[in-house]
Amino acid sequence: MDAVAFSLAKAHELGMRPAEARLRFWSYLIDYSVSFAVLLPAGIGYVFYLVTKQYSVVPMVLTGASGLLLVVYLIVLLSLNSRKGSSPGKAAMRLRAVRLADFSAPGFPRVLGLAVVFLGSHLIPLIGPLLLLFSCLFDRQHRRGWLDRLAGSYVLDLRSGIDPTNERVLARAEYLLTRPDRDISEHLPGLGTVVHGAPAEEAVLSPRPRSSAGIVGAQNSDWHAAAAGGRRVVRRAALAFDDGSYVPVPETGLIGRAPVADAGSSNALLIPLKDPERLLSKTHLSFGSDGADVWIMDLGSSNGTQVTTANGRPHNVPAKTRALLNDGDIVQIGSRTFRITFQETEK
């Protein structure tokens, strides 16, 4: 299997889907329509010239304005396509172009080369651009046209597949590839119950101060470190969730849709999170402090756990392995995120 075939097979396994010809046609039509709208002042200036039968300042100003707007629009198109793999038309149709090698944005050299080739196709009016545009019909499986092959790119339909330029989504998809035996029952509603027979995921759990999440279990703990000179420094850590809730880190805790502690860890702090997209496992991960650091451990969840450091890219946390966290690290679990924060005070 050559590199292109391997990349295409991997793209399909990760959940990427090629854009259909009709969607690509409409995206190009939208981009063309914007360019024609930019040339409208020049058209008005030309009509003004035909009516007056003489050169004047008005047609020249309108033509100059159109020329300037067209240059700005072309720069915007080149920038969007090179940095995002997008354009006004692609954004409207939910399409995105990526490099087939690593599924990143195409980059400026490739986009500039494609622009030159596409503009050159206009030497054969109408037929040239349409032939390039609909050449994707010749590849029934992957819908890659001549321009895609020339640039080593791939145009994706984000409505029916994942967006690989979203690093968290891509990391989660890559994680799922490593777990073909994952338990699909994690995506089903949990059957666990709490007191009074209410479903665990819908139970109203008593919140702790400054947190909108339902929390059950152990008391929060501070970490104490004796400093030089007899001063006592208290280091506090907390989880800042994406909904604005704030939970001090205890010695041990569990997070999930409806986390359940084992018999041997009855003092664990339980944090159930709302997860409309059903990407969280029932008991997704454990966390806590060991006296000096904050740690998390993925408990074999279906969709994995990703950590984004302050200066790095998201990376998957191996299941059943403790991972230490630093101040500012962001943890992604399903569709939810929380950030680790530290604060030191003297006592």
Image: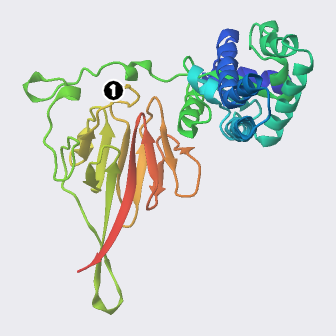
Q: Nearer the viewer, residue 73 or 168?
A: 73
- Which residue is painted at 39% across and 23% down in the image? 186
Q: Position of residue 25 (x, y in %)?
A: 69, 14
Q: Nearer the viewer, residue 246 or 89?
A: 89
Quadrant of the snapshot with the C terminus: bottom left
Q: Is residue 11 visible?
A: no
* Number of marks in picture: 1
In the image: residue 268, left or right of residue 112 = left
- Label 1 sits on what residue type? Pro
Quadrant of the snapshot with the N terminus: top right
Callout 1: 10 Å neighbours few (<14), some, many (20+)? Answer: few
- The extreme right residue here reads 123
- Which residue is painted at 52% across and 54% down in the image? 309
Q: Secondary structure at mark 1?
A: loop
Q: Quadrant of residue 95?
A: top right
- Which residue is painted at 92% across and 20% down in the image? 123
Q: Quadrant of residue 201?
A: top left
In the image: residue 121, left or right of residue 319 = right
- The extreme left residue here reads 196
Q: Nearer the viewer, residue 13 or 44?
A: 44
Q: Position of residue 320 (x, y in %)?
A: 46, 42
Q: Position of residue 97 (x, y in %)?
A: 70, 28
Q: Is residue 111 visible?
A: yes
Q: Position of residue 24 (x, y in %)?
A: 69, 16
In the image: residue 91, left or right of residue 139 = left
- Which residue in the protein does label 1 denote? 276
Q: Give the image's coloring scheme.
A: rainbow
- The extreme bottom residue here reads 229
